[in-house]
């Protein structure tokens, strides 16, 4: 069974209709009445499988002129044509000296890899373009600062069997592949993704060991598939794996963590949604970074998933100089809600080796949450979390809206900074701050 994308042709989508005519006749049965002539009404052709934005269309014509519309629309073609070498990058971008040097120095895991579609969203000239910064390495990537580690979250320590992390009591993280369609430079698993063989290898035999563990541990009710990116698997192995998991009685629901609907949206084919619909209850966490990703193509990929009954949530990493402004996040989260994606997690950037240039102070995350809470719909406010180094798990960090306590009253602060009392007889919340609360109230 092949784990990599198959090279077979995809069956036509329901959107691919040929231009035909719709016959329309009207017959009157009353004596003496004439039969109206047949009227030929042209049927409007259905839109292509995926709409294509103007910026992407111009990019494709300039840099991939030999690609047919069908090829550009084929996720396997996009996967095969990923930009992976210095020569390919220099053909598309005017690289800075720092970028060029960092690319030449690269060895091992976390290679450069960008789909042509996603490259079309990046600036050709500006090395500080948000999406470009997240995918083209710079020199700081080779500097390890205090507190950084290759596996800061202790996933290897909590691996019950290779590729299966059992940290929380009732759920497991199932790493099913080391392949991504694009490689984010701040990746939590930069130690393992994109590498061939070595300590981190992924195979069907490894899957079987993980499945056996899940079957034997009846406390596991929730399985999160990640990697790498599970949606880079071909349909057959993905369906096999999901079917095996769905057959385990105590596994109540499945989750898929992915960035594919954002960087390779044409992967969300009719056949993929058919497979996923059979696996309910199934949820999907999609990795979004910046409003620039909210294209026509992504609108289509998320619509197909949502229309298949899959609840969609977003996971966003807070990144310095990329999305660390309230208005940037508000624009992203509003756009996600319009696409039926609930902003779920805002992650503090993990202390992966070589990621210091991406990390903000924690107060920046709190500032963003305060700038959202009360200033826009609550659906647009994610959980801000720090995944604790050493395997402590996700810890929510929230602005302090509990000012203190004054007698039987809890004193609270709202989004405008005003204080309000809430009667709470017999309670203790805020008691340690009582004097300050009384003075402010």
Image: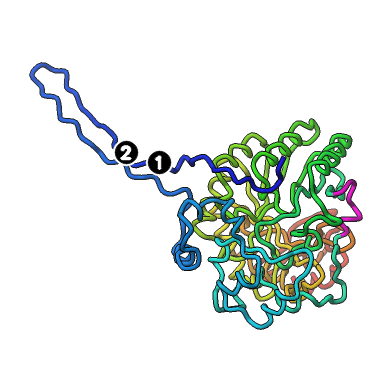
Image quadrant in which the C terminus is located: bottom right
Q: How far from the left and from the top, in percent, is residue 2?
A: 70, 43
Look at 68% across and 38% down and name the residue there: 239
Query: In this view of the protein, which residue sits in the foreground, 120 or 303?
Result: 120
Q: Is residue 93 left or right of residue 391?
A: left
- On screen, 363 above or below 48? below
Q: Is residue 84 left or right of residue 31?
A: right
- On screen, 210 above or below 296? above
Query: In this view of the protein, which residue sits in the foreground, 428 or 284?
Result: 284
Residue underneath mark 2: 20
Q: Which residues are magenta?
A: 154-162
Magenta stretch encompasses residue 380:
no
State how the image is colored: rainbow
Q: Is residue 227 left or right of residue 89?
A: right
Label the magenta part by its dominant secondary structure.
loop
| Cα gap from disc 1 to disc 2, whole angstroms | 9 Å
Q: Are marks 1 and 2 in contact (CB under 8 Å)?
A: yes
Q: How far from the left and from the top, in percent, is residue 118?
A: 57, 62
Query: In this view of the protein, which residue sits in the foreground, 345 or 424?
Result: 345
Indicate the secondary structure of the residue bearing disc 1. Answer: loop
Question: Which label sits on residue 429?
Answer: none
> Is residue 40 shown to the viewer in this render?
yes
Q: How far from the left and from the top, in percent, is residue 319?
A: 69, 70
Look at 76% across and 74% down and name the residue there: 141
Residue 245 is drawn in which quadrant? Answer: top right
Residue underneath mark 1: 17
Name of the residue lying farthest toward the bottom: 97
């Amino acid at each position: 069974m092949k784990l990599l994308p198959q090279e077979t042709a995809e069956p036509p989508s329901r959107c691919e209709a040929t231009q035909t005519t719709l016959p329309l006749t009207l017959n009157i049965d009353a004596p003496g009445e004439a039969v109206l002539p047949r009227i030929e009404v042209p049927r409007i052709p259905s839109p292509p499988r995926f709409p294509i934005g103007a910026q992407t269309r111009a990019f494709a014509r300039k840099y991939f002129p030999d690609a047919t519309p069908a090829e550009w629309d084929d996720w396997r073609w996009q996967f095969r044509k990923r930009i992976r070498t210095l020569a390919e990058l220099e053909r598309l971008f005017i690289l800075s000296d720092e970028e060029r040097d960092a690319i030449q120095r690269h060895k091992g895991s976390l290679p450069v890899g960008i789909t042509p579609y996603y490259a079309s969203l990046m600036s050709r000239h500006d090395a500080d373009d948000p999406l470009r910064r997240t995918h083209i390495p710079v020199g700081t990537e080779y500097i390890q600062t205090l507190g950084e580690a290759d596996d800061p979250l202790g996933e290897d320590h909590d691996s019950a069997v290779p590729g299966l992390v059992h940290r929380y009591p009732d759920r497991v993280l199932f790493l099913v592949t080391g392949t991504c369609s694009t490689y984010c430079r701040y990746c939590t698993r930069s130690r393992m993704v994109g590498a061939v063989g070595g300590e981190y290898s992924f195979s069907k035999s490894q899957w079987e060991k993980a499945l056996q563990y899940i079957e034997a541990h009846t406390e596991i009710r929730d399985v999160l598939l990640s990697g790498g990116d599970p949606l880079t698997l071909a349909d057959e192995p993905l369906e096999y794996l999901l079917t095996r998991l769905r057959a385990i009685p105590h596994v109540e629901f499945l989750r898929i963590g992915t960035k594919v609907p954002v960087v390779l949206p044409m992967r969300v084919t009719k056949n993929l949604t058919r497979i996923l619909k059979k696996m309910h209850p199934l949820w999907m966490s999609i990795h979004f970074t910046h409003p620039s990703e909210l294209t026509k193509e992504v609108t289509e990929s998320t619509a197909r998933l949502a229309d298949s009954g899959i609840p969609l949530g977003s996971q966003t990493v807070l990144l310095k100089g990329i999305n660390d402004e309230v208005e940037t996040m508000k624009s992203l989260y509003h756009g996600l809600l319009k696409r039926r994606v609930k902003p779920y997690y805002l992650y503090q950037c993990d202390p992966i080796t070589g990621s210091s240039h991406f990390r903000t102070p924690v107060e920046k995350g709190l500032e963003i949450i305060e700038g959202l809470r009360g200033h826009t719909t609550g659906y647009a406010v994610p959980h801000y979390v720090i995944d604790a180094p050493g395997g402590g798990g996700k810890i929510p960090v929230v602005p302090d809206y509990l000012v203190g306590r004054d007698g039987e009253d809890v004193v609270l602060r709202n989004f405008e900074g005003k204080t309000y009392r809430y009667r709470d007889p017999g309670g203790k919340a805020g008691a340690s701050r009582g004097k300050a609360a009384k003075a402010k109230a």
